[in-house]
Amino acid sequence: MAAEIINLRQARKTKARAEKEKQADQNRLTFGRTKAEKSLTKALNEKAEKALDQGRLERGADKPED
């Protein structure tokens, strides 16, 4: 029936380290891309935007806009 004795200071530090590691993992996913990956993503986004703009219909000059 004896409870396990823990050092609260060490428990807080362990929890803080785990939280920092979790944040570091998230930052690696968010910001940890190579220059090549960034340029590829940029090129794909520009290509998709250009394709979208090509399909856009423009209003004719003969129709008055209300």
Image (spheres, rainbow, N blue to C red):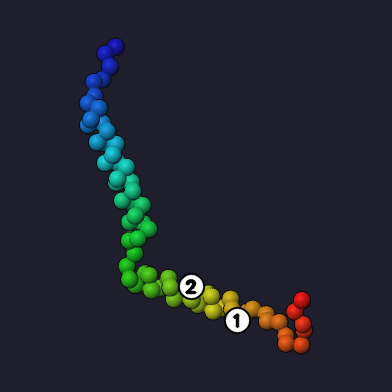
The extreme top residue here reads 1
User: Identity of the amino acid at label 1?
Assistant: Gln
On the rendered image, what quadrant is the N terminus found in? top left
Residue 65: x %, y % from top left: 75, 79
Residue occupying the point 32% across, 42% down: 19
Badge 2: residue crowd in 10 Å (few <14, some 14–19, many ≥20):
few
Residue occupying the point 34% across, 64% down: 33
Observer-nearest residue: 9 or 43?
9
Quadrant position of residue 64: bottom right
Quadrant position of residue 34: bottom left
Q: SS at mark 1?
A: helix
Quadrant position of residue 15: top left
Label 2–label 1 contact, CB within 8 A: no
Residue occupying the point 31% across, 51% down: 24
Residue occupying the point 67% across, 80% down: 57
Question: Seen in the image, is 43 located left or right of residue 64?
Answer: left
20 over 40 or under it: above or below: above
Circle on res. 54? 1
Residue corresponding to mark 2: 45
